[in-house]
Amino acid sequence: MVETAPAKLPASAASKTGHSHRVIIVGGGFGGLYAAQSLGQAPVEVTLIDRRNFHLFQPLLYQVATGGLSPGDIASPLRSVLNRQKNTQVLLGEVTELDPDAQQLTLKDGDVVPYDSLILATGSAHHYFGNDHWEAIAPSIKTIEDALEVRRRIFLAFEKAELEPDPEIQAALLTFVIVGAGPTGVEMAGAIADLAYHTLRKDFRSIDPRQTKIILVEGMDRVLPPFAPSLSAKAAQDLQQLGIEVRTQTFMTSLEGEQVTFKSGDTEETIRAHTVLWAAGVRASSLSKVVCAKTNAPSDRAGRIMVEPDFSVPSYPNIYVIGDLAHYAHQDDKPLPGVAPVAMQGGKYVARLISDRLRDKPTPAFHYTDSGSLAIIGRSSAVVDLNWTKLTGFPAWVVWALVHVMFLIEFDNKVIVMTQWMWNFFTRNQGARLITGRDVIKSDSAFMKQ
Amino acid sequence: MVETAPAKLPASAASKTGHSHRVIIVGGGFGGLYAAQSLGQAPVEVTLIDRRNFHLFQPLLYQVATGGLSPGDIASPLRSVLNRQKNTQVLLGEVTELDPDAQQLTLKDGDVVPYDSLILATGSAHHYFGNDHWEAIAPSIKTIEDALEVRRRIFLAFEKAELEPDPEIQAALLTFVIVGAGPTGVEMAGAIADLAYHTLRKDFRSIDPRQTKIILVEGMDRVLPPFAPSLSAKAAQDLQQLGIEVRTQTFMTSLEGEQVTFKSGDTEETIRAHTVLWAAGVRASSLSKVVCAKTNAPSDRAGRIMVEPDFSVPSYPNIYVIGDLAHYAHQDDKPLPGVAPVAMQGGKYVARLISDRLRDKPTPAFHYTDSGSLAIIGRSSAVVDLNWTKLTGFPAWVVWALVHVMFLIEFDNKVIVMTQWMWNFFTRNQGARLITGRDVIKSDSAFMKQ
């Protein structure tokens, strides 16, 4: 079979452009992709390295998890997004080592990649706050595989309930707990409510999906803590109207099999729930440790690398960290939030900085433009804070839909997603609710016996 | 965790319709689904059992394998297709045992399902003619998981080639062998040619995807053996024009790692190919053995159950076998082919037979209406034999596209597929070319080391 000896990368066509300054970008999320696109006309050779061959539009991943969209609808092949940039190549690979003094990276397969400027944008992973054994029971939704696994569990729970004679077990199968009421948790809870109370309403004969219990748990005193309190209140009201039980100032303290224990103040309660989803915590991706160890850069509690005002790592002005991987101190020393606009703006800024430096041109300081925040609640409501105005209900939903479609990178995805949404909106049907994965029945039994 | 004791199924809402004749249908493919739909108004209680929660439109599965469509585009949840039929319920389950005298089935989880009439329609599985170890190296495309695995391998081959310095290994990575030139093999070869020579043309920097070698191997003396010889000749010409090497009267005799050995007459040749796909043989699904053992029904070489002229099993007039699982002797004792129209017509006929028998009404003998055969070759050509006329080239492609969209069960799938096709047709872009599966890079290395 094929075996690749550790070697420098083959001479690429990109090097045929004759530029000698090599910019390596690690990660093809919003930050890395915007950096690559902003460098398309710069006199540099760009290489984008990602473990996956596609850019994933994460804000819509919850719709894959709930059967509204297919993975292909929200993912764009990186090569096709960037194929018109003559100075850019894409490599499928995972960075495992960094040597900041020799200015080179090592990939998992042993290949060595030298750079002149390095942009790190590998984002975040989920975080169980020391309860790593919860991960198998309560998956979170960061990758396409995660989303398909969650989709499998949600729809399998209804299938099992349909077959279950014991009413107590049936009730557990129809109980969904979502831990964390940030935008992802709120969106998941809303989508599951819409599924159970509308889409699946007529699909079963032994169970009534309207008996489904959905519990949204949040440690803070309100849902959507990053939003204005008035929007949090409206969101909580919308969620309750959808039939969701919202529990704030409540923590999950134990999770064993189907036994979920909540703590609220001094009160503890254990309930039985078949499906528990995690939307509570993220931390920087694992590359953070490598970078901090090799550059002595400090990191925060979530593992994010503390960067200089120009996104560079202390003592290494040619290594930049952007997006969710970076801790960028902002007003009152609070870091910029881990959202797509921050990553995009960081990517664009760093690209400009590299171009300017090559021409010995000064670059103005980075200024973050906060264009607001939005979260969707169920099928036709949302909360939107545009800073200059706040919207709720259906008008907010329209803004939410427009913003999301606008940012879907490729045109064909936009058309497909809009068609699918219009269809789902008018029919409440969700065509992508497939249970997949090898050996559907067996593999789940294995999980059940864990 | 949930544990279900073996038990009769819970009383279902379907039994509330007051009908006492229970029809159990096993398999939600074309045969089973058409049978269920035809029984929607009959005075019976219908239960459709499938291992999966969706009907899969298999004729378009090759487009999922080549990144043109997403799984959700060609799959429809069985529950939503059938939810308007008050007398019908759907169960997710796998049948493992049959007791034809007690008139009951046993599911994998131990549940027992009694029936009055039984329709078996579990279709076919791939078949390696005694070379089962080829399966790991040369996957075939029968399920969504198969298609995603093939998609992963195809796109990963290009990614690896881009990184590969050794020109010989690079050439092996860019060599694709498809074994079997029936419709599936021809369609796969055409789709890969379109990918390599058009869609991916500008996506790489070290390799030129136009160097890709695609070899289509067929044991018979022409491609598309079931078609008229003139259409086979036109198809072969179209394939060669696309850049595909067609080898007829050639057999794959050995497959070890990347070493593929072909035999043609007395000549043997071994080439090196990274990706080998199997489109050569199918046999009846595994339920066939259980049925033959319990009912003493004879089966043919491919494991298909030999049925009576009314699709029933000899000595058991209330057990029917339809679709790819059945060997239905037709003209000259040749069985009906394993295609969707045969399954659909069988399903409808058996449904009518059951209704008629309940009313003591005679049913006319089954008559198969052969509406023709079609196969697509690449992006804009096809061969179509409508019996009263033969079409090739672009007109045939239009017929092919209309027929396929027409039969896609659900309306939303039709809209999505048409949008996607129009987009792919005009741009040659294929947005669903994602490499997925946990740990993309690692899992492939494991495969490579096998």
Image (spheres, coloured by chain):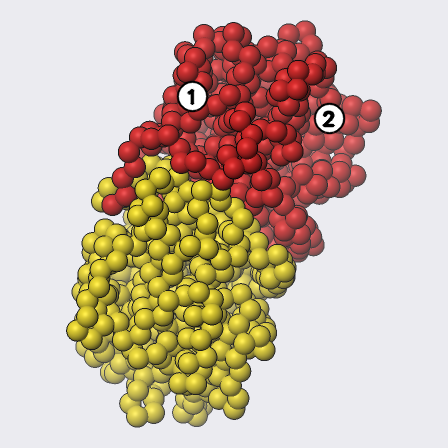
Chain colours: A red, B yellow
Q: In this view, does B111 lie above or below B234?
A: above
**Helix, strand or loop for disc 1:** strand
Q: In this view, does A260 lie above or below B283?
A: above
Upstream in the sequence, badge 1 or badge 2? 1
B361 left or right, relative to B258:
right
Which numbered dot is residue A372?
2
- For the point 63% across and 60% down, which residue is it? B426
In front here: B66 or A66? B66
**Helix, strand or loop for disc 2:** loop
For the residues labelled 1 and 2, say whether their Cβ atoms are less than 8 Å apart. no
Q: Quadrant of the N terminus of chain B?
A: top left
In front here: A138 or B180? B180
The image position of residue B243, as x and y in percent, is 44, 65
- For the point 73% across and 41% down, which residue is it? A402
Which numbered dot is residue A104?
1
- For the point 62% across and 48% down, which residue is it? A413
Amino acid found under the numbered disc labelled 2: Gly
Q: Is residue B110 visible?
A: no
